[in-house]
């Protein structure tokens, strides 16, 4: 089953679909795992440097909105670049995970609102 980029744009955060490549996906035990790697495109704010794609950060796993009764986990690998001139490691500062959670910001906000309705 091939997941279409157009379909992903409807169900995943725009930042993820725009700046990361879906490299694999699998369903096991009622859970959907989507694996992403940050694209090789150098950060626009670092265009003044000569950068080469270097290594990835350790993969993070983020829980997202359930789909069709299945749990969804996003496996995300952020990229680091090496500045050829100075030898400095450069990376983007992403805000993918809601603070204090392992969930996407949108999913955490949804659960927070849902919790307010349950207390009525």
Image (cartoon, rainbow, N blue to C red):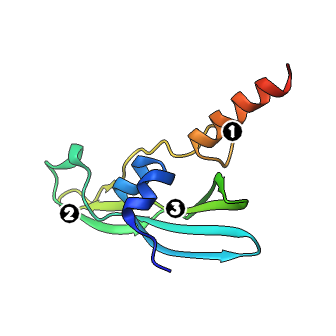
Task: Give the left or right position of residue 102, taking residue 92 as reference.
Answer: right
Q: Secondary structure at mark 3?
A: strand
Disc 3 to disc 2, how far (Cα)?
Answer: 26 Å
What residue does disc 1 label? Answer: 100
Q: Residue at x 13, y 48 (%)?
A: 48
Task: Give the left or right position of residue 52, taking residue 92 as reference.
Answer: left
Q: Is residue 8 above or below residue 111?
A: below
Coordinates of residue 42 in the picture (x, y in percent): 24, 57
**Residue 77 or 17: which is nearer the viewer?**
17
Disc 1 to disc 2, how far (Cα)?
Answer: 35 Å
Farthest residue in the bottom direction?
1
Q: Secondary structure at mark 2?
A: loop
Coordinates of residue 69 in the picture (x, y in percent): 73, 59
Disc 2 residue crowd, few under 14, some 14–19, many 20+, Cα 10 Å = few
Disc 3 residue crowd, few under 14, some 14–19, many 20+, Cα 10 Å = many
Coordinates of residue 101 in the picture (x, y in percent): 69, 43
Q: Which mark is residue 76?
A: 3
What residue does disc 2 label? Answer: 84
In which quarter of the view is residue 108 placed?
A: top right
Disc 1 residue crowd, few under 14, some 14–19, many 20+, Cα 10 Å = few
Q: Is residue 95 above or below residue 43?
A: above
Q: Earlier in the sequence, mark 3 or mark 2?
A: 3
Q: Residue at x 65, y 60 (%)?
A: 72
Farthest residue in the left direction?
48
Q: Secondary structure at mark 1?
A: loop
């Amino acid at each position: 089953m091939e997941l279409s980029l157009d379909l992903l744009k409807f169900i995943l955060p725009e930042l993820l679909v725009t700046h990361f490549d879906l490299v694999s996906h699998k369903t096991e035990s009622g859970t959907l795992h989507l694996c992403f790697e940050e694209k090789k495109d150098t950060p626009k704010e670092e265009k003044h440097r000569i950068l080469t794609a270097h290594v990835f950060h350790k993969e993070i796993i983020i829980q997202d909105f359930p789909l069709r009764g299945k749990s969804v986990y996003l496996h995300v690998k952020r990229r680091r670049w090496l500045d050829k001139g100075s030898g400095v490691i450069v990376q983007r500062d992403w805000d993918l995970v809601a603070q204090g959670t392992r969930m996407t910001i949108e999913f955490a906000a949804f659960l927070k609102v849902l919790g307010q309705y349950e207390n009525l």
